[in-house]
Amino acid sequence: MLTAVTLIQATREGLAELGPALAAAQGVAEVYTVTGEWDFVVMIRVRQHDELADVVMHGLSPLKGIERTQTMVAFQQFSRHDLEALFGVGLEAER
């Protein structure tokens, strides 16, 4: 599984309408509105790199209201559960 994070800067008009359209794109797992330089964070999960290119170029970029994007491909994933399990190795024998 390939995970990518796409940051989106929206036009003023896009701020109100873009969220649902982004979430409806094939390959998009989650969409968040955020503060700061970027307006949306889009989590993309696909199987292969060419699918990622298709999602970004054909699923997201044509949407009306997008001013600028930046896509980052994730190398590793860490979650609270993973980190707790990692740091708890060997502790289960002490319980």
Image (cartoon, helix red, strand yellow):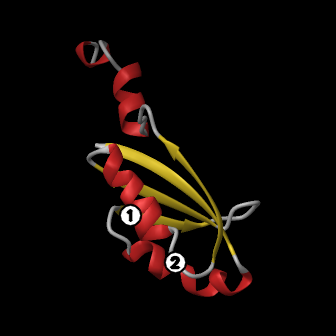
Q: Position of residue 79 (x, y in %)?
A: 42, 39
Task: Count every numbered label the image shows and give the total.
Answer: 2
The three-letter amino acid code for the residue at tag 1 is: Val
SS label for mark 2: loop
**Which residue sits at x=35%, y=44%?**
49
Q: From mark 2 to mark 1, how far is it between C-alphas?
A: 14 Å
The three-letter amino acid code for the residue at tag 2 is: Leu
First in sequence, mark 2 or 1: give its number.
1
**Which residue sits at x=46%, y=62%?**
57
| Residue 30, above or below 22 | above
Q: Position of residue 5 (x, y in %)?
A: 50, 51
**Which residue sits at x=62%, y=86%?**
16
**Which residue sits at x=33%, y=49%?**
50
Q: Is residue 94 left or right of residue 32?
A: left
- Judging depth in this view, the residue of 57 and 1 nearest the camera is 57
Q: Is residue 82 left or right of residue 95?
A: right
Q: Is residue 76 left or right of residue 92?
A: right
| Residue 71, above or below 94 | below
Quadrant containing the N terminus in the rendered view: top left
* Residue that badge 2 annotates: 63
Q: Position of residue 75 (x, y in %)?
A: 44, 32
SS label for mark 1: strand
Q: Residues within 10 Å of mark 1 (few under 14, many from 20)?
A: many
In front: mark 2 or mark 1?
Answer: 2
Mark number displayed over residue 28: 1
